Image (cartoon, grey):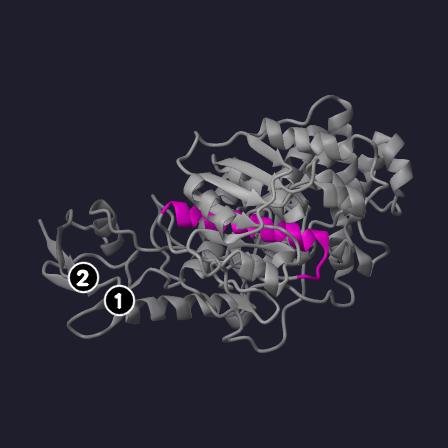
Amino acid sequence: MPFLTIDQRRIEAKPGATILQAARSAGIEIPTLCYLEGFEAGASCMVCAVKLKHNGQFIPACGSRVVDGMEVEHDTQEVRDARRMALELLFSDHLGDCLSPCQRICPAHLGIPAVLKHLRAGDFGMAAAAARRDLALAGILCRICHRPCEHGCRRNVHDDAVAIADLVVHAIDTELAAGEARVPTHPPQRQGRIAIIGSGFTGLSTAWFLTQQGYSCTVLDEQPLPAATIRAAFPDLPPGLLDAELRLLERAGVEFRCASRIAGAADLANLTREFAAVVLATGPATHAQAAALGLATDGHHLAADKHSMMTSQAGVFVAGRAVRPAGQPVNSVADGKAAAVCIHQYLTNQPVTRPPKPFSVFMGKVLDGEMPDFLQEASGAGRSDAAAMAVDIERAIEESKRCVHCNCAKADVCKLRQLAIDYDVNLHRFSSGERMRFHRNVEHPLVCFEAGKCIRCGNCIKVAGDHQEALGLTFVGRGFEVHLGVPFHESMRDGLLEAARAAVAACPTGALTLRED
Protein backbone atom coordinates (compact mmCIF):
# COMPACT_ATOMS: atom_id res chain seq x y z
CA MET A 1 0.00 0.00 0.00
CA PRO A 2 1.44 3.40 -0.94
CA PHE A 3 1.84 6.04 1.72
CA LEU A 4 2.25 9.78 1.75
CA THR A 5 2.99 12.41 4.35
CA ILE A 6 0.65 15.36 4.83
CA ASP A 7 2.08 18.03 7.11
CA GLN A 8 4.48 15.47 8.60
CA ARG A 9 1.66 12.99 9.25
CA ARG A 10 2.18 9.59 7.61
CA ILE A 11 -0.94 8.30 5.87
CA GLU A 12 -1.55 5.02 4.12
CA ALA A 13 -3.50 5.30 0.84
CA LYS A 14 -5.34 2.84 -1.32
CA PRO A 15 -3.70 2.08 -4.69
CA GLY A 16 -4.76 4.69 -7.25
CA ALA A 17 -6.18 7.06 -4.62
CA THR A 18 -5.85 10.80 -5.02
CA ILE A 19 -4.32 13.03 -2.35
CA LEU A 20 -7.82 14.29 -1.57
CA GLN A 21 -9.21 10.79 -1.07
CA ALA A 22 -6.28 9.76 1.11
CA ALA A 23 -6.58 12.90 3.21
CA ARG A 24 -10.31 12.44 3.75
CA SER A 25 -9.88 8.81 4.72
CA ALA A 26 -7.51 10.03 7.44
CA GLY A 27 -9.92 12.73 8.64
CA ILE A 28 -8.02 15.62 7.02
CA GLU A 29 -10.40 18.03 5.30
CA ILE A 30 -9.02 19.70 2.18
CA PRO A 31 -11.44 22.31 0.76
CA THR A 32 -12.98 21.73 -2.68
CA LEU A 33 -15.34 23.52 -5.05
CA CYS A 34 -15.23 21.79 -8.44
CA TYR A 35 -14.79 18.26 -7.05
CA LEU A 36 -17.85 15.99 -7.24
CA GLU A 37 -17.73 12.59 -5.56
CA GLY A 38 -18.05 9.73 -8.04
CA PHE A 39 -16.90 11.74 -11.07
CA GLU A 40 -13.51 12.39 -12.62
CA ALA A 41 -11.83 15.42 -11.09
CA GLY A 42 -11.85 18.58 -13.16
CA ALA A 43 -9.18 20.35 -11.08
CA SER A 44 -10.31 23.71 -12.46
CA CYS A 45 -10.64 25.89 -9.35
CA MET A 46 -7.37 25.06 -7.51
CA VAL A 47 -9.06 25.62 -4.16
CA CYS A 48 -7.81 22.17 -3.10
CA ALA A 49 -4.18 23.09 -3.84
CA VAL A 50 -1.43 21.42 -1.81
CA LYS A 51 2.33 21.92 -2.07
CA LEU A 52 4.84 19.24 -2.98
CA LYS A 53 7.61 19.49 -0.46
CA HIS A 54 10.44 18.29 -2.69
CA ASN A 55 10.05 20.90 -5.43
CA GLY A 56 7.62 23.54 -4.05
CA GLN A 57 5.07 22.94 -6.82
CA PHE A 58 1.36 23.50 -6.10
CA ILE A 59 -0.91 20.74 -7.40
CA PRO A 60 -4.67 20.04 -7.12
CA ALA A 61 -5.33 17.43 -4.45
CA CYS A 62 -8.53 16.28 -6.17
CA GLY A 63 -6.80 15.20 -9.39
CA SER A 64 -3.33 14.16 -8.24
CA ARG A 65 -2.65 10.50 -7.51
CA VAL A 66 -0.65 9.46 -4.48
CA VAL A 67 2.93 8.45 -5.27
CA ASP A 68 4.58 6.27 -2.67
CA GLY A 69 6.69 8.40 -0.33
CA MET A 70 5.10 11.67 -1.47
CA GLU A 71 5.34 14.58 1.02
CA VAL A 72 2.85 17.42 0.75
CA GLU A 73 1.94 20.50 2.75
CA HIS A 74 -1.73 21.25 3.39
CA ASP A 75 -2.23 23.44 6.44
CA THR A 76 0.50 26.05 6.10
CA GLN A 77 0.26 29.78 5.60
CA GLU A 78 1.77 29.50 2.12
CA VAL A 79 -0.85 26.97 1.03
CA ARG A 80 -3.66 29.03 2.58
CA ASP A 81 -2.39 32.07 0.66
CA ALA A 82 -2.47 30.09 -2.59
CA ARG A 83 -6.02 28.95 -1.95
CA ARG A 84 -7.05 32.47 -1.02
CA MET A 85 -5.67 33.75 -4.32
CA ALA A 86 -7.60 31.06 -6.21
CA LEU A 87 -10.78 32.17 -4.46
CA GLU A 88 -10.10 35.85 -5.12
CA LEU A 89 -9.64 35.10 -8.82
CA LEU A 90 -13.05 33.43 -8.84
CA PHE A 91 -14.62 36.46 -7.17
CA SER A 92 -13.10 38.79 -9.76
CA ASP A 93 -15.64 37.35 -12.20
CA HIS A 94 -18.52 36.74 -9.79
CA LEU A 95 -21.78 38.67 -9.96
CA GLY A 96 -24.73 38.50 -7.62
CA ASP A 97 -25.70 39.42 -4.08
CA CYS A 98 -25.35 36.85 -1.30
CA LEU A 99 -27.71 38.88 0.88
CA SER A 100 -30.37 41.10 -0.63
CA PRO A 101 -29.72 44.85 -0.28
CA CYS A 102 -32.73 45.17 2.03
CA GLN A 103 -31.36 42.59 4.47
CA ARG A 104 -27.81 43.88 4.26
CA ILE A 105 -28.81 47.47 5.08
CA CYS A 106 -31.03 46.51 8.03
CA PRO A 107 -29.00 47.09 11.24
CA ALA A 108 -30.49 43.89 12.72
CA HIS A 109 -30.07 42.00 9.39
CA LEU A 110 -33.68 40.83 9.35
CA GLY A 111 -34.02 37.82 7.02
CA ILE A 112 -36.46 39.66 4.77
CA PRO A 113 -36.33 37.16 1.87
CA ALA A 114 -37.47 34.37 4.21
CA VAL A 115 -40.32 36.49 5.58
CA LEU A 116 -41.51 37.38 2.07
CA LYS A 117 -41.20 33.78 0.90
CA HIS A 118 -43.58 32.61 3.64
CA LEU A 119 -45.97 35.44 2.85
CA ARG A 120 -46.01 34.53 -0.85
CA ALA A 121 -47.04 31.03 0.24
CA GLY A 122 -49.81 32.51 2.42
CA ASP A 123 -48.21 31.22 5.66
CA PHE A 124 -48.43 34.26 7.93
CA GLY A 125 -47.51 32.26 11.02
CA MET A 126 -44.19 31.17 9.55
CA ALA A 127 -43.59 34.70 8.25
CA ALA A 128 -44.05 36.03 11.79
CA ALA A 129 -41.74 33.33 13.17
CA ALA A 130 -39.07 34.21 10.59
CA ALA A 131 -39.29 37.88 11.59
CA ARG A 132 -39.02 37.08 15.30
CA ARG A 133 -35.96 34.92 14.65
CA ASP A 134 -34.01 38.10 13.82
CA LEU A 135 -35.97 40.84 15.59
CA ALA A 136 -37.14 41.26 19.14
CA LEU A 137 -40.48 43.09 19.41
CA ALA A 138 -40.89 42.72 15.65
CA GLY A 139 -44.52 43.87 15.59
CA ILE A 140 -43.60 47.08 17.38
CA LEU A 141 -40.26 47.76 15.76
CA CYS A 142 -41.52 47.55 12.17
CA ARG A 143 -44.29 50.04 13.03
CA ILE A 144 -41.92 52.70 14.29
CA CYS A 145 -38.78 51.94 12.26
CA HIS A 146 -37.30 54.49 9.85
CA ARG A 147 -37.26 51.60 7.33
CA PRO A 148 -33.74 51.54 5.89
CA CYS A 149 -34.64 48.19 4.30
CA GLU A 150 -37.11 49.89 1.97
CA HIS A 151 -34.56 52.55 1.03
CA GLY A 152 -32.28 49.69 -0.06
CA CYS A 153 -34.99 47.76 -1.93
CA ARG A 154 -33.90 47.25 -5.55
CA ARG A 155 -37.50 47.50 -6.73
CA ASN A 156 -37.11 51.26 -6.21
CA VAL A 157 -35.24 51.36 -9.52
CA HIS A 158 -38.44 50.32 -11.31
CA ASP A 159 -41.30 51.88 -9.33
CA ASP A 160 -41.68 51.70 -5.53
CA ALA A 161 -40.02 49.64 -2.83
CA VAL A 162 -41.77 46.56 -1.50
CA ALA A 163 -43.69 47.49 1.68
CA ILE A 164 -41.40 45.34 3.83
CA ALA A 165 -42.17 46.84 7.24
CA ASP A 166 -45.93 46.86 6.65
CA LEU A 167 -45.77 43.21 5.60
CA VAL A 168 -43.93 42.21 8.79
CA VAL A 169 -46.51 44.15 10.82
CA HIS A 170 -49.31 42.38 8.95
CA ALA A 171 -47.77 38.96 9.63
CA ILE A 172 -47.35 39.69 13.36
CA ASP A 173 -50.86 41.14 13.67
CA THR A 174 -52.36 38.15 11.85
CA GLU A 175 -50.51 35.78 14.17
CA LEU A 176 -51.67 37.63 17.31
CA ALA A 177 -55.26 37.84 16.04
CA ALA A 178 -55.26 34.04 15.77
CA GLY A 179 -54.06 33.63 19.37
CA GLU A 180 -50.81 33.86 21.29
CA ALA A 181 -47.59 34.10 19.30
CA ARG A 182 -45.61 30.90 19.08
CA VAL A 183 -42.58 30.57 21.34
CA PRO A 184 -39.43 29.64 19.38
CA THR A 185 -37.85 26.33 20.23
CA HIS A 186 -34.53 26.63 21.99
CA PRO A 187 -31.82 24.26 23.26
CA PRO A 188 -31.97 22.73 26.75
CA GLN A 189 -31.40 25.04 29.72
CA ARG A 190 -27.81 26.22 29.85
CA GLN A 191 -25.74 26.95 32.90
CA GLY A 192 -25.49 30.61 33.82
CA ARG A 193 -28.23 33.12 34.60
CA ILE A 194 -28.08 36.63 33.15
CA ALA A 195 -29.31 39.88 34.67
CA ILE A 196 -30.33 42.66 32.29
CA ILE A 197 -30.76 46.14 33.72
CA GLY A 198 -33.27 48.08 31.63
CA SER A 199 -36.39 46.98 29.76
CA GLY A 200 -36.15 49.17 26.71
CA PHE A 201 -35.46 47.92 23.18
CA THR A 202 -31.86 46.94 23.98
CA GLY A 203 -32.60 45.09 27.18
CA LEU A 204 -35.60 43.19 25.83
CA SER A 205 -33.69 42.31 22.65
CA THR A 206 -30.77 40.95 24.70
CA ALA A 207 -33.16 38.84 26.76
CA TRP A 208 -35.00 37.56 23.68
CA PHE A 209 -31.89 36.28 21.94
CA LEU A 210 -30.33 34.83 25.09
CA THR A 211 -33.47 32.80 25.84
CA GLN A 212 -33.32 31.45 22.27
CA GLN A 213 -29.89 30.08 23.18
CA GLY A 214 -31.24 28.40 26.32
CA TYR A 215 -30.24 30.94 28.98
CA SER A 216 -32.39 32.09 31.89
CA CYS A 217 -32.72 35.88 31.93
CA THR A 218 -34.00 38.34 34.54
CA VAL A 219 -34.83 41.86 33.38
CA LEU A 220 -34.67 44.53 36.08
CA ASP A 221 -36.22 48.00 35.81
CA GLU A 222 -36.68 50.80 38.30
CA GLN A 223 -40.16 51.57 36.93
CA PRO A 224 -43.26 49.75 38.27
CA LEU A 225 -44.04 48.30 34.81
CA PRO A 226 -41.62 46.81 32.25
CA ALA A 227 -40.96 48.67 29.01
CA ALA A 228 -41.96 51.99 30.55
CA THR A 229 -39.65 53.94 28.22
CA ILE A 230 -41.26 52.31 25.16
CA ARG A 231 -44.75 53.07 26.49
CA ALA A 232 -43.83 56.72 27.03
CA ALA A 233 -42.05 57.18 23.70
CA PHE A 234 -44.72 55.48 21.58
CA PRO A 235 -48.13 56.08 23.17
CA ASP A 236 -50.00 55.43 19.91
CA LEU A 237 -49.13 51.73 19.63
CA PRO A 238 -52.19 49.51 19.19
CA PRO A 239 -53.76 48.62 22.56
CA GLY A 240 -52.43 45.41 23.99
CA LEU A 241 -49.60 44.98 21.46
CA LEU A 242 -46.74 45.74 23.86
CA ASP A 243 -48.28 43.57 26.57
CA ALA A 244 -48.60 40.70 24.06
CA GLU A 245 -44.89 41.03 23.23
CA LEU A 246 -44.00 41.04 26.94
CA ARG A 247 -46.11 37.92 27.51
CA LEU A 248 -44.19 36.21 24.72
CA LEU A 249 -40.92 37.07 26.46
CA GLU A 250 -42.25 35.65 29.73
CA ARG A 251 -43.42 32.48 28.00
CA ALA A 252 -39.94 32.18 26.49
CA GLY A 253 -38.50 32.20 30.03
CA VAL A 254 -37.75 35.86 30.80
CA GLU A 255 -38.43 36.99 34.39
CA PHE A 256 -39.24 40.64 35.13
CA ARG A 257 -38.25 42.38 38.37
CA CYS A 258 -39.78 45.82 38.38
CA ALA A 259 -39.25 48.64 40.90
CA SER A 260 -35.65 47.42 41.21
CA ARG A 261 -33.12 50.24 41.23
CA ILE A 262 -29.44 49.53 40.66
CA ALA A 263 -27.81 52.78 41.71
CA GLY A 264 -24.41 51.99 43.19
CA ALA A 265 -21.41 49.71 43.20
CA ALA A 266 -22.86 47.63 46.06
CA ASP A 267 -26.03 46.93 44.04
CA LEU A 268 -23.98 45.91 41.02
CA ALA A 269 -21.75 43.70 43.17
CA ASN A 270 -24.80 41.88 44.53
CA LEU A 271 -25.97 41.20 40.97
CA THR A 272 -22.59 39.86 39.88
CA ARG A 273 -22.69 37.43 42.80
CA GLU A 274 -26.19 36.24 41.89
CA PHE A 275 -25.79 36.12 38.11
CA ALA A 276 -23.11 34.80 35.75
CA ALA A 277 -23.26 37.96 33.62
CA VAL A 278 -24.87 41.39 33.83
CA VAL A 279 -25.95 43.66 30.98
CA LEU A 280 -26.39 47.42 31.37
CA ALA A 281 -29.12 48.47 28.95
CA THR A 282 -30.25 51.54 30.84
CA GLY A 283 -30.24 54.19 28.15
CA PRO A 284 -27.82 57.16 28.27
CA ALA A 285 -25.65 57.03 31.41
CA THR A 286 -23.87 60.07 32.80
CA HIS A 287 -20.31 60.13 34.10
CA ALA A 288 -21.65 60.35 37.65
CA GLN A 289 -23.92 57.32 37.22
CA ALA A 290 -21.10 55.25 35.76
CA ALA A 291 -18.74 56.33 38.54
CA ALA A 292 -21.35 55.39 41.15
CA LEU A 293 -21.41 51.87 39.74
CA GLY A 294 -17.63 51.70 40.00
CA LEU A 295 -17.16 51.45 36.24
CA ALA A 296 -14.70 53.28 34.01
CA THR A 297 -15.93 56.09 31.77
CA ASP A 298 -14.91 57.31 28.35
CA GLY A 299 -15.38 61.05 28.45
CA HIS A 300 -18.99 61.55 29.52
CA HIS A 301 -20.19 57.97 28.96
CA LEU A 302 -19.63 54.42 30.13
CA ALA A 303 -16.48 52.90 28.69
CA ALA A 304 -16.77 49.57 26.90
CA ASP A 305 -14.50 47.51 24.73
CA LYS A 306 -15.84 47.94 21.19
CA HIS A 307 -15.12 44.32 20.34
CA SER A 308 -16.38 42.49 23.43
CA MET A 309 -18.99 45.04 24.60
CA MET A 310 -17.63 44.50 28.14
CA THR A 311 -17.11 47.26 30.68
CA SER A 312 -14.05 47.63 32.90
CA GLN A 313 -15.52 44.89 35.12
CA ALA A 314 -15.36 41.33 33.83
CA GLY A 315 -18.77 39.82 33.17
CA VAL A 316 -20.52 43.20 33.06
CA PHE A 317 -21.56 44.17 29.54
CA VAL A 318 -23.10 47.34 28.19
CA ALA A 319 -25.15 47.89 25.04
CA GLY A 320 -27.47 50.30 23.29
CA ARG A 321 -27.87 53.92 24.22
CA ALA A 322 -25.87 53.47 27.40
CA VAL A 323 -22.79 53.76 25.19
CA ARG A 324 -24.40 55.18 22.04
CA PRO A 325 -26.86 57.87 23.24
CA ALA A 326 -28.21 58.60 19.77
CA GLY A 327 -29.72 56.09 17.41
CA GLN A 328 -32.90 54.52 16.13
CA PRO A 329 -34.78 51.72 17.96
CA VAL A 330 -33.66 49.19 15.33
CA ASN A 331 -30.03 49.99 16.24
CA SER A 332 -30.83 49.30 19.89
CA VAL A 333 -32.40 45.96 18.95
CA ALA A 334 -29.30 45.13 16.88
CA ASP A 335 -27.07 46.00 19.86
CA GLY A 336 -29.07 43.66 22.08
CA LYS A 337 -28.69 40.90 19.52
CA ALA A 338 -24.91 41.45 19.44
CA ALA A 339 -24.68 41.58 23.25
CA ALA A 340 -26.40 38.18 23.44
CA VAL A 341 -23.70 36.72 21.17
CA CYS A 342 -20.89 38.21 23.28
CA ILE A 343 -22.41 36.93 26.53
CA HIS A 344 -22.82 33.44 25.10
CA GLN A 345 -19.17 33.48 24.06
CA TYR A 346 -18.14 34.68 27.51
CA LEU A 347 -20.14 31.99 29.33
CA THR A 348 -18.81 29.23 27.07
CA ASN A 349 -15.14 30.32 27.37
CA GLN A 350 -14.81 31.40 23.74
CA PRO A 351 -13.02 34.53 22.50
CA VAL A 352 -15.50 37.35 23.10
CA THR A 353 -16.07 39.50 20.06
CA ARG A 354 -19.03 41.33 18.62
CA PRO A 355 -20.33 39.45 15.53
CA PRO A 356 -19.11 40.90 12.23
CA LYS A 357 -21.43 41.97 9.48
CA PRO A 358 -22.62 38.96 7.48
CA PHE A 359 -20.43 38.24 4.47
CA SER A 360 -22.02 39.25 1.19
CA VAL A 361 -21.00 39.98 -2.34
CA PHE A 362 -22.74 43.19 -3.45
CA MET A 363 -23.67 43.59 -7.09
CA GLY A 364 -24.10 47.34 -6.83
CA LYS A 365 -26.18 49.64 -8.96
CA VAL A 366 -28.53 48.11 -11.52
CA LEU A 367 -27.34 48.97 -15.03
CA ASP A 368 -29.60 50.13 -17.83
CA GLY A 369 -31.52 47.22 -19.29
CA GLU A 370 -30.95 44.84 -16.33
CA MET A 371 -34.17 45.47 -14.41
CA PRO A 372 -36.38 43.35 -16.72
CA ASP A 373 -34.42 40.26 -15.70
CA PHE A 374 -35.09 41.02 -12.03
CA LEU A 375 -38.79 41.53 -12.74
CA GLN A 376 -39.33 38.21 -14.53
CA GLU A 377 -40.77 36.45 -11.48
CA ALA A 378 -42.11 39.50 -9.64
CA SER A 379 -45.64 40.87 -9.65
CA GLY A 380 -46.10 43.92 -11.82
CA ALA A 381 -48.70 45.44 -9.49
CA GLY A 382 -48.14 48.79 -7.81
CA ARG A 383 -47.40 49.08 -4.10
CA SER A 384 -50.31 48.44 -1.71
CA ASP A 385 -50.74 50.75 1.26
CA ALA A 386 -50.73 49.50 4.84
CA ALA A 387 -54.45 50.08 5.40
CA ALA A 388 -55.38 47.97 2.37
CA MET A 389 -53.10 45.09 3.43
CA ALA A 390 -54.38 45.19 7.01
CA VAL A 391 -57.90 44.23 5.92
CA ASP A 392 -57.12 42.14 2.84
CA ILE A 393 -54.82 39.12 3.10
CA GLU A 394 -54.72 38.75 -0.68
CA ARG A 395 -53.38 42.29 -1.01
CA ALA A 396 -50.61 41.42 1.44
CA ILE A 397 -49.73 38.28 -0.49
CA GLU A 398 -49.71 40.25 -3.74
CA GLU A 399 -47.43 42.87 -2.19
CA SER A 400 -44.96 40.16 -1.13
CA LYS A 401 -44.87 38.94 -4.73
CA ARG A 402 -43.49 42.33 -5.83
CA CYS A 403 -40.10 41.22 -4.46
CA VAL A 404 -37.53 40.93 -7.27
CA HIS A 405 -35.45 38.21 -5.49
CA CYS A 406 -32.10 39.97 -5.14
CA ASN A 407 -30.80 37.49 -2.58
CA CYS A 408 -29.03 34.24 -3.36
CA ALA A 409 -31.30 31.29 -2.66
CA LYS A 410 -28.27 29.19 -1.71
CA ALA A 411 -26.44 31.73 0.44
CA ASP A 412 -26.58 29.53 3.53
CA VAL A 413 -25.13 26.48 1.75
CA CYS A 414 -22.91 28.14 -0.88
CA LYS A 415 -19.44 26.56 -0.73
CA LEU A 416 -17.84 29.58 -2.37
CA ARG A 417 -19.27 31.93 0.26
CA GLN A 418 -18.23 29.71 3.15
CA LEU A 419 -14.68 29.37 1.84
CA ALA A 420 -14.52 33.14 1.34
CA ILE A 421 -15.32 33.54 5.03
CA ASP A 422 -12.90 30.81 6.13
CA TYR A 423 -10.03 32.23 4.07
CA ASP A 424 -10.84 35.92 4.66
CA VAL A 425 -10.80 36.78 0.96
CA ASN A 426 -10.46 40.26 -0.47
CA LEU A 427 -13.39 40.49 -2.86
CA HIS A 428 -11.83 43.35 -4.80
CA ARG A 429 -8.21 42.19 -5.09
CA PHE A 430 -8.45 41.34 -8.80
CA SER A 431 -11.44 43.51 -9.65
CA SER A 432 -11.12 45.50 -12.87
CA GLY A 433 -13.70 48.06 -11.78
CA GLU A 434 -16.14 46.85 -14.41
CA ARG A 435 -18.60 44.02 -14.07
CA MET A 436 -20.48 41.71 -16.39
CA ARG A 437 -24.14 42.31 -17.03
CA PHE A 438 -26.71 40.64 -14.81
CA HIS A 439 -28.78 37.92 -16.44
CA ARG A 440 -31.31 35.54 -14.92
CA ASN A 441 -32.59 32.61 -16.98
CA VAL A 442 -35.97 31.24 -15.83
CA GLU A 443 -37.01 29.43 -19.02
CA HIS A 444 -36.87 26.08 -17.18
CA PRO A 445 -39.99 25.32 -15.06
CA LEU A 446 -37.88 24.08 -12.13
CA VAL A 447 -34.50 25.78 -12.40
CA CYS A 448 -33.24 29.35 -12.25
CA PHE A 449 -29.79 29.99 -13.74
CA GLU A 450 -27.69 33.09 -12.99
CA ALA A 451 -24.61 33.09 -15.18
CA GLY A 452 -22.79 35.63 -12.98
CA LYS A 453 -22.58 33.13 -10.13
CA CYS A 454 -21.25 30.27 -12.27
CA ILE A 455 -17.61 29.35 -11.56
CA ARG A 456 -17.46 26.98 -14.57
CA CYS A 457 -16.70 23.96 -12.42
CA GLY A 458 -18.51 21.61 -14.81
CA ASN A 459 -20.36 19.69 -12.09
CA CYS A 460 -23.77 20.22 -13.68
CA ILE A 461 -22.39 19.03 -17.03
CA LYS A 462 -21.17 15.80 -15.41
CA VAL A 463 -24.50 15.20 -13.71
CA ALA A 464 -26.49 15.81 -16.88
CA GLY A 465 -24.27 13.32 -18.71
CA ASP A 466 -24.70 10.78 -15.95
CA HIS A 467 -28.49 11.11 -16.34
CA GLN A 468 -28.05 10.48 -20.08
CA GLU A 469 -29.71 13.73 -21.09
CA ALA A 470 -30.17 13.90 -24.86
CA LEU A 471 -28.71 17.41 -24.97
CA GLY A 472 -27.45 18.12 -21.47
CA LEU A 473 -25.19 21.07 -20.72
CA THR A 474 -21.81 22.16 -22.05
CA PHE A 475 -19.35 25.03 -22.07
CA VAL A 476 -19.84 27.41 -24.97
CA GLY A 477 -17.27 29.87 -26.33
CA ARG A 478 -13.54 30.30 -25.84
CA GLY A 479 -11.16 32.05 -23.48
CA PHE A 480 -12.76 34.66 -21.26
CA GLU A 481 -16.04 34.24 -23.15
CA VAL A 482 -16.62 30.66 -21.99
CA HIS A 483 -20.03 30.21 -20.40
CA LEU A 484 -22.43 27.44 -19.49
CA GLY A 485 -25.09 26.64 -22.07
CA VAL A 486 -27.08 23.98 -23.90
CA PRO A 487 -25.73 22.51 -27.16
CA PHE A 488 -27.10 23.88 -30.43
CA HIS A 489 -28.36 27.02 -28.65
CA GLU A 490 -31.34 25.11 -27.26
CA SER A 491 -33.08 26.21 -24.06
CA MET A 492 -32.27 25.18 -20.50
CA ARG A 493 -35.64 23.43 -20.46
CA ASP A 494 -34.43 21.13 -23.26
CA GLY A 495 -31.02 20.56 -21.70
CA LEU A 496 -32.28 19.42 -18.32
CA LEU A 497 -35.22 17.10 -18.89
CA GLU A 498 -34.34 14.60 -16.15
CA ALA A 499 -31.33 15.97 -14.26
CA ALA A 500 -32.62 19.39 -13.14
CA ARG A 501 -32.73 18.72 -9.40
CA ALA A 502 -29.48 16.76 -9.45
CA ALA A 503 -27.74 19.58 -11.33
CA VAL A 504 -28.92 22.11 -8.75
CA ALA A 505 -27.65 19.89 -5.93
CA ALA A 506 -24.25 19.52 -7.64
CA CYS A 507 -23.77 23.28 -8.14
CA PRO A 508 -21.43 24.60 -5.39
CA THR A 509 -22.73 28.17 -5.70
CA GLY A 510 -26.08 29.84 -6.32
CA ALA A 511 -25.74 29.71 -10.10
CA LEU A 512 -28.32 26.92 -10.37
CA THR A 513 -31.20 27.06 -7.90
CA LEU A 514 -34.70 25.67 -7.72
CA ARG A 515 -37.42 28.14 -8.59
CA GLU A 516 -39.79 28.94 -5.76
CA ASP A 517 -42.89 27.65 -7.53
Q: Is residue 125 above or below residue 516?
A: above
- Per the rendering, the mark at residue 320 is none
Residue 491 visible somewhere in the drawing? no
Amino acid carrying label 1: it is Thr
Q: Nearer the viewer, residue 167 or 238?
A: 238
Which secondary structure type mostly characterizes the magenta part of the structure? helix
Q: Residue at x 79, y 45 (%)?
A: 232
Q: Are marks 1 and 2 in contact (CB under 8 Å)?
A: yes
* Label 2 packing within 10 angstroms: few (<14), some (14-19), many (20+): some
User: Dot 2: what SS?
Assistant: loop
Within the magenta stretch, is there residue 343? yes
Q: Is residue 190 above or below residue 418?
A: above
User: Dot 1: what SS?
Assistant: loop
Q: Residue at x 18, y 61 (%)?
A: 7
Q: Nearer the viewer, residue 512 or 348?
A: 348
Q: Position of residue 279 (x, y in %)?
A: 53, 49
Q: Position of residue 336 (x, y in %)?
A: 59, 49
Lateral position of residue 186 relative to residue 128, left or right? left
Q: Position of residue 508 (x, y in %)?
A: 47, 51
Mark 1 vs mark 2, CA separation in Å:
8 Å
Q: Position of residue 140 (x, y in %)?
A: 75, 41
**In the rendered image, which quarter is residue 418 located in?**
bottom left
Amino acid carrying label 2: it is Asp
Q: Residue at x 48, y 62 (%)?
A: 307
Q: Nearer the viewer, residue 373 or 260?
A: 260
Residue denoted by label 1: 76
Q: Residue at x 34, y 54 (%)?
A: 41
Residue denoted by label 2: 7
* Label 1 packing within 10 angstroms: few (<14), some (14-19), many (20+): few
Within the magenta stretch, is there residue 444? no
Identify the magenta region.
325-348
Residue 26 visible somewhere in the drawing? yes
